[in-house]
Image (tube, rainbow, N blue to C red):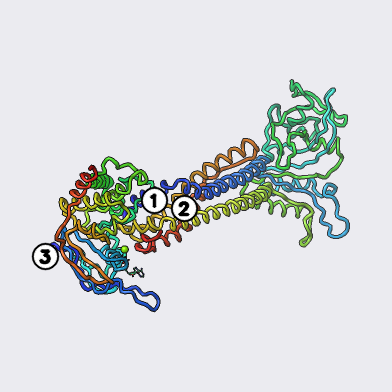
Amino acid sequence: MNLLNLLRISWKAISRNKLRASLTMLGIIIGVAAVIAMVAIGQGSKQSIQSQIAAMGSNMIVIRPVSNVTGGARLDNTTVQTLTEADVNALRKKAQYITAVSPSVSARGQVINGPYNWTTTVQGISPEYLSIRGWSLQDGVPFNEQNMKAGAKVCLAGQTVIQNLFPDRENVIGKSIRFKHIPFKIIGILSKKGENTFGQDQDDIILTPITTVQKRILPTIYYQLIFASAISENATAQAMSEIEKIMRASHRLQPGIDDDFSIRSQAELINAFSSTGRILTILLAVIAGISLVVGGIGIMNIMYVSVTERTKEIGLRMSIGARGTDILLQFLIEAILISISGGIIGVGLGFLITKLVGVFLHWPTLVTQSSVILSFLVCFLTGVFFGYYPALKASRLDPIDALRYE
Amino acid sequence: MANVIVDIKNLMRLFKMGEETIHALDGVSFSINQSEFLTIMGSSGSGKTTLLNIMGCLDRPTSGRYILDGTDISSFSKTELARFRNKKLGFVFQTYNLLARTSALENVELPLLYNPAISSKKRKELASEALDAVKLSDRMYHFPNQLSGGQQQRVAIARAIVNDPVMILADEATGNLDSKTSYEIMALFQELNETKGKTIAFVTHEVDIASFSKRTIQLRDGKIIKDEPNKNVRNAREVLQNMKVTAVP
Ligand SMILES: Nc1ncnc2c1ncn2[C@@H]1O[C@H](COP(=O)(O)OP(=O)(O)O)[C@@H](O)[C@H]1O
Ligand SMILES: [Mg+2]
């Protein structure tokens, strides 16, 4: 039997009852559209989280002080004082998997420029900080080692700060702003970074040499945080264990004693969020997959009804020379054609829903090739699987009985 | 005897109904030569359809021999029987059995779709020739529901001859038609038999219809009780003409 002829036969049989075919398709259409749209939403949110975190500096490693005192009152992390200049120096000297290290101490308060004032964070850091965060200057120059040594009253201002203190934004470089009665000269403007994953405005900041903060604002010899940058994203894990080793040596921690610091990498954060995204995607895909199965059962249902209803037609076809296999294939192809057509329409509808979600809800979406291919594959298999038994039933009919059927 | 199409010897067909065994065919023997027009007659339940089904390779005998066009088909598998039906036989049913919402042409094409040796072009050609032979060239694209009963049966006859079968099998083919239309169908069968030399086996229980064939086999309880040539073969075309004459007083 010629497959092309069988395709013709099946196609004609379907087009003879378009309404039934469309109704059968409906389940598949909805199922596939659901798969496409759901997976697109899941993937979209996953990707947007990933890119947001990556924008914070994908090689970045953050070291925080923690209390390693077990039992008794646990101290708040901000008051734990374990990170020191010695640690930073040790890291700079000994670590091989990190390219840059910067300590950090922050203070919050009001900054004033003439009639304008704004409450923000002043973060003291070393010049390497910008490269660790992957941050560039929109204007001006970064501060240098000399500024560091001198504890110079210079700063780099974030976009939000500029916006609030210099509404006209004219000649900002070289101007002075006051923080806790200390005038800071703006030598650079940070480029816009936007909100981070947690919704914090990363541009609401003033960067200044850490020595300046330690000397003039927040007299302390301890650091609140140490930032470092792994030589590559892949080397993050090695960098972290290296840091731990160096820090333990620097803090003279005996074996068996807990770390008095914690190390977190941006990569971990990405993974944590990615797996949330992955779970979301899987969950959505499962829901959508169930609707596909329901669609498939719909096909089986209608194919069974159709076989019974078309018993006489089957008898006739057999009498004029159709073999059991021809009948089997005809009904199987009908089921597959219906499910694949439903799949094509479903993919189209899925794209449309995805677009609408993007336009009206502003949700990030991403239609992946694999979800489209997978849907088609599932449609094909649905057609085969749910079409097979009705088709088998049809092919096993006895021509005489079938012809006599009323 | 080179032209024997059907050779049947001692054919038995039994149906088991619980304890009881029905002898639908009980030792039937006869043969049909090429270009014969044969009627199988008998009252209801006499075994006509059972015999025609076996002759049409839709059913297999319980015992006995059946040679069709030189091939013993008693041991054929279902698939081989299907092939044989497709190449060698044409069926005409009482209820036409046309596919709904399918043009006359496509209905006639149907048997050829199951023959991979025939191209798309050849199929169209043969189908329109067959419709021509039943004088329905002007109704090629009509659907069954746009045709009268007689026209539908002519489409079915075109479908039965499109594969150039060695024999046409008709089971009560005029059973659903009024007498005038029945005569038209019989005229068509006579024409196919006489001008094209088609072998026809025609089942009916009406003596009136049987009189258009050349030979009649009479069945009773699965046995042949009479098998003889018709002495006065009527010409359906003439009968139709006379009807017209008498219709106008
Ligand atoms: N599939 C079957 N099962 C049981 N009995 C059958 C079957 N087909 C036919 N018969 C019986 O065989 C006999 C002949 O039937 P059939 O050939 O249909 O008669 P006819 O066509 O002459 O009216 C009847 O008694 C009928 O009941
Ligand atoms: Mg009968």
Say which amino acid is labelled 3. Met
Q: Quadrant of residue A184?
A: top right
Are dots 3 and 1 in contact, CB under 8 Å? no
Q: CA distance from mark 3 to mark 1?
A: 44 Å
Local secondary structure at mark 1: helix
Q: Residue at x 58, y 45 (%)?
A: A37
Q: What residue is shown with label 3?
A: B1
Q: Nearer the viewer, mark 2 or mark 1?
A: 1
Residue A380's disc is: 2
Q: Residue A361: give x, y in percent of width and height.
A: 65, 38
Local secondary structure at mark 3: loop
Q: Are marks 3 and 1 on the same chain?
A: no
Quarter of the image for residue A194 reads top right
Q: How many marks?
A: 3
Q: Check disc 3: other Cα within 10 Å, few if <14, some if 14-19, many if 20+.
A: few
The quarter of the image holding the N terminus of chain A is bottom left
Label 3 marks a residue whose chain is B
Front: mark 3 or 1 = 3
Residue in view at x 88 percent, y 58 percent: A72
Comes first in the chain, label 2 or label 1: 1
SS at badge 2: helix
**Residue beneath label 1, please?**
A10
Query: In the rendered image of this protein, does residue B53 appear above or below residue A148?
Result: below
Q: Chain of mark 1?
A: A
Q: Quadrant of ligand 1?
A: bottom left
Q: Which class describes the residues within 10 Å of circle 2: few (<14), some (14-19), or many (20+)?
A: some
- Is B10 placed above or below A113 here? below
Q: Can you give x and y, in whole percent of width and height, for residue B68 in the image?
A: 21, 64
Query: Do marks 3 and 2 share a subunit?
Result: no
Q: Amino acid at mark 1?
A: Ser
